[in-house]
Amino acid sequence: MKSFLGIDLGTTHSLAAIEDEKGTRVLVPPGADSPLVPSVVALLEDGTFLVGTAAKNLSILHPERVIHSAKRLIGRTRAEVALEAATLPYRLVEGSGGRALVRIPLKNQSFRDLSPEEISAHILQEVHRRALAALEAEGRDISDPSLRQIVLTVPAYFDEAQRQATKRAAELAQLEVIRLINEPTAAALAYGLGERKQANIVAYDLGGGTFDVSVLRVQEGIFRVLATHGDTQLGGDDFDRLILDAMLQQIENETSARPKEDPQILSQLRLAAEALKKRLSTKEEADLEIDVSGDGTLEFNLRRDQFEEMIRPLVERSMRELRSCLHDAELMPADVDEVLLVGGSTRIPLVTKSLEKEFQKPPLSGIDPDLAVAFGAARQGAVLAGQSEDVLLLDVVPLSLGIETLGGTFAKLILRNTPVPCSHTEEFSTQVDNQTGIDFNIYQGERELVKDCRKIGSFKLSGLPALPAGLPRVAVTFTVDEQGLLRVTARELRTGKTASVEVKPMGLSEEEVRRMVHESINKAGEDMSAREAIDLRNKAEGVLKGTEAAMKAGGKGLPPEQVYSLKKAISRVKKALGNNEREQNTLALHQALEELSSLTGQLADDLISSAVSTALKNEQENKNR
Amino acid sequence: MKRMDHFERLGLERDPRPCPVQLEKAYLQKSKETHPDRLRGKANWSEEDESKNLQVSAAINEAYRVLSKPWERFAYLVELYEPGILERTKKLSPAFLMEAMEMGEAIEQARSDPLLKRQLATDLQERIVKIRERIADLLQDPKNAEEVGTLLHQSKYLRRSLETLQRQEDQIPL
C-alpha cells in the first residue's frame, strides 16, 4: 500500500511516522528505544558529521562544534538572530544576502560554514534513514521510490522564506517534499476529530523554539483553519535560558567561578537547566548540586512557583496571541469545543492551567504532545497517496504578503488569514520610456512600512515591450498555493506576452541546492560503500569519545546496572570497530551504535546534572593551579 | 468561454441573502472537488493541470470570502447587475452630506459624554441594520442598481462613523 512518510522537523527533536495497513505509527528502528532524534548536529574536526543523541552527547566535550536549534535560524538573516547568537555556544557568521551561517572550526585552523538548511538536511537524512531501517525490519521493500517522498511539517507562523528554506533542506537530503503542512493543523488531524459533525478547535502548539496557535473548524472530515497566529521565536529554549540566567547569577554571586567565559561549562549548564525544567513539570521542587572547588558546594534550588514567575511573561505572550487568533476567527472562548496540546512545552503545568482558565475546560491530551505532529503528517501522507477521500485540509496565509512601493511603504496584496490557495492580480507600468524591466521586492508582515516587515525575496520582470513610460500594462499575479508557498507570474496585457519572473528567495538559491546535491552525488560515485564505512567509523569514534567523556564526568552518580549496560554497549561498538578498517564489521557497527545511542539518550539527563558539577570543579582546579 | 461569477463558482443562484449554512456547504463541497490535494494523488497529474487547478481553487476561496460578507456581497452583486455603477453613484447628495457633518460633530461631542456616545452608537447600529435590509430587498431586482449604489456609499459612511465611535470607547473608560 502506497503512503508517504510524515516527518516532523522540530527545534529540539525530529521524528518520522507512517500510516498504512498496519495503522498510524511512529517509526523506531531496531535497537533504538525512542522515535525521537534530537535535532542536533555535530561536525568533528576531521569533517565527519554526527547527528542526534551522539551529537548531543558531544556537547559536553565540544560545545563549539555541536549545533542545536537550527530551526530558529532557518530562513533568517544574521542580523535577525543577533539576540539568539549571544546565547549560542557555536559561532554565527553572515553569509551571502546577510543570511545566518554556523561556523565550525576544523583541523589546522580551517573552518567550515554550514547553512541552517544543510544542518537540517543532516537531521532529515538521519530521521529518514532510521525510518527506512524500521520499515525494513518489518519486512517492507525499502527500495520503493515513494519512500523518498515525504510530508514535512513547518510552524504555521513560518513565513515564505522559512518555508522555502525548509523545503530546500529536504531537497539537500534528497527527499521530495510532496506537501508542507502546518504543525497545528497536522496535530488536529492526528486527534482524529474528523468524524465530528461540527467542532471548533484550538491547537496550541508550544514547542522547543516556536509557538503556533490555530483555530480550526472541523466539519465532516474537512479541517478548515479560520485563523492562525504565533511567534517563531518563542518556546522551551527560552524557558531554559531563563533558568540558565538564574543559575549563572547565583554561581557568580556566591563563588569566584566565572562560568560565562567557558563555553564548555555554559553548554553543560544549559543542558542542566533543560533537565531541571523537565523535572519541574512533575515535581514541586528541583535541586542541582554544583561542586565548586575552593568555594565548596553550591546548591541551586528552584521551586515550581519560582519557575512559573520566571516564565509567566512568556506564557502570557502566547495567551495574547491566542486571543488575537480567536478574535480573527470571530469566535469567543465559549465557542471552542476542544483545545489540543501540541509540543513538549505544553507539559508545563502553568501552560495547561492558563489554557484551562481561558476556556473553562481541560485541554485534550490523548496523544503524546511530542508525537502528535508527526502522526498528523503521516495521516496526510496517506490521504495524498490516495488512501482516503474523506479528509481535506484548508489552511490560511499566516502573514500578509505584498511588495514595496514608493517611499518604502508596504502594499499588501494578500492579507493574513486568507484561505489558501489564493491569488491576487495587480497591474503595474513603467516609469521611463523604453523601460523593459521592473524590479520588485517582496515583503511579509503586518506593519505599514517595509522596514518593519520581513523581506522574503525579490523578482525582476523583464522582456517588456519598449514603449513610452506608463504605456505597458503588466498584470502581476501572486498565488499562494495550498502549502503556503508563493508563486509569481506576470503578463503584459497589450502584447499578451508572458514576462519572465524569477523570485530570488532569501536563503539558499535553487542553483546552490542543485550544486550541493550534485556534489554529494558525485561523491557517491567514488565508492559509496567504502565511504560509508569510513564515515561510520569516524562517527563511532566520535560517539565513543563523547560517551566516555560524559561517563567520566558524571559516572559517579549513575546506578551500577546502568554503568554496566553502558560499558557493555561500548565494548560492542569497540568490537565491531576492530583494530583497524579491515577488521571493521560495518553491519554490526550500525546496530551497536544504535543501541549505544538509545542508552545514552536515556541517561543524558542524569549524566548532565552530575557532569556539570564535576566539570565546574575541574575548571576551578585548573584555575587554582 | 464566459468567465464564471462567484455565485456560479459555488453553484448558487444570484441571491442577496443566501442561507449561510447552504453557502458554507456549497463552499466545502466545491473545495472537495477542486482542492489541489485531491488531484495530486491521481494518476494523470501534471504540473500544468496543477497550476490551472490552483487558480480554480483560489477562485472558490475568493468567492466564499466575498459572498459570506454581506457588504462585500452587495457591492459584488450590484456590479454584476450594472458594471461601473459604484463609481457612478459615488457622489453623495447635499442632504446626506449635511447630515454627515452633523453626525461628525456629535461624535466629537460624545468624546466626553458617555451617555451621548451610547445613544449615538445605538442609533447608528439601528440605521445600519435598516439600510442593510433595504439594500438586500432592492437587490432582488437588477433595475434598482442605482439606488443600491447610492445606499451602499451612504452605508459605508455610517459604518465608518460607528467604527470611530467604538474606537473612542477603547480610549475612554465609561
Image (spheres, coloured by chain):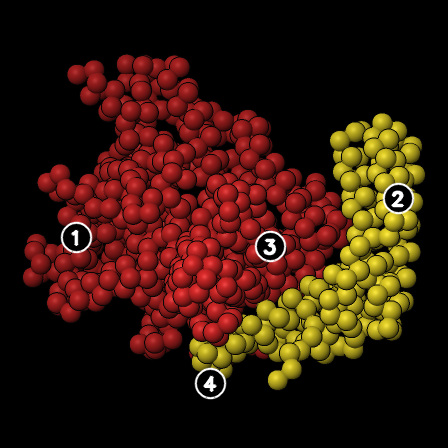
Chain colours: A red, B yellow
Displayed quadrant of residue A389: bottom right
Instruction: Please report the residue visible at 36 percent of the width from the left and 60 percent of the height from the top.
Output: A168
N-term-proximal mark, 1 vs 3:
3
Instruction: Please report the residue visible at 55 percent of the width from the left and 35 percent of the height from the top.
Output: A314
Q: Secondary structure at mark 4?
A: loop
CA–CA distance in space, label 2 to label 4: 64 Å
Instruction: Please report the residue visible at 29 percent of the width from the left and 62 percent of the height from the top.
Output: A511
Q: Secondary structure at mark 2?
A: helix
CA–CA distance in space, label 2 to label 3: 35 Å
Residue A336 position in % (x across, y down): 72, 53
Q: Are marks 1 and 3 in contact (CB under 8 Å)?
A: no
Chain designation of label 3: A
Q: Closer to the observer: label 4 or label 3?
A: 3
Badge 1 local density, few (<14 within 10 Å), some, or many (20+)? some
Q: In this figure, which residue is indicated by the disc labeled 4?
A: B44
Residue A453 visible: no
Q: In this figure, which residue is indicated by the disc labeled 2?
A: B98
Q: In this figure, which residue is indicated by the disc labeled 3?
A: A415
Badge 3 local density, few (<14 within 10 Å), some, or many (20+)? some
Q: Nearer the viewer, residue A266 or A287?
A: A266
Q: Closer to the observer: label 1 or label 3?
A: 3
Inspect the image, locate mark 3, and give the three-letter code of the amino acid beneath it.
Leu
Q: Closer to the observer: label 1 or label 4?
A: 4
CA–CA distance in space, label 1 to label 4: 46 Å
Instruction: Please report the residue visible at 67 percent of the width from the left and 44 percent of the height from the top.
Output: A323
**Above-or-below relation of B50 to A577:** below
Q: Are marks 2 and 4 on the same chain?
A: yes
Q: Are marks 2 and 3 in contact (CB under 8 Å)?
A: no
Chain designation of label 2: B
Q: In this figure, which residue is indicated by the disc labeled 1?
A: A538
CA–CA distance in space, label 1 to label 3: 50 Å
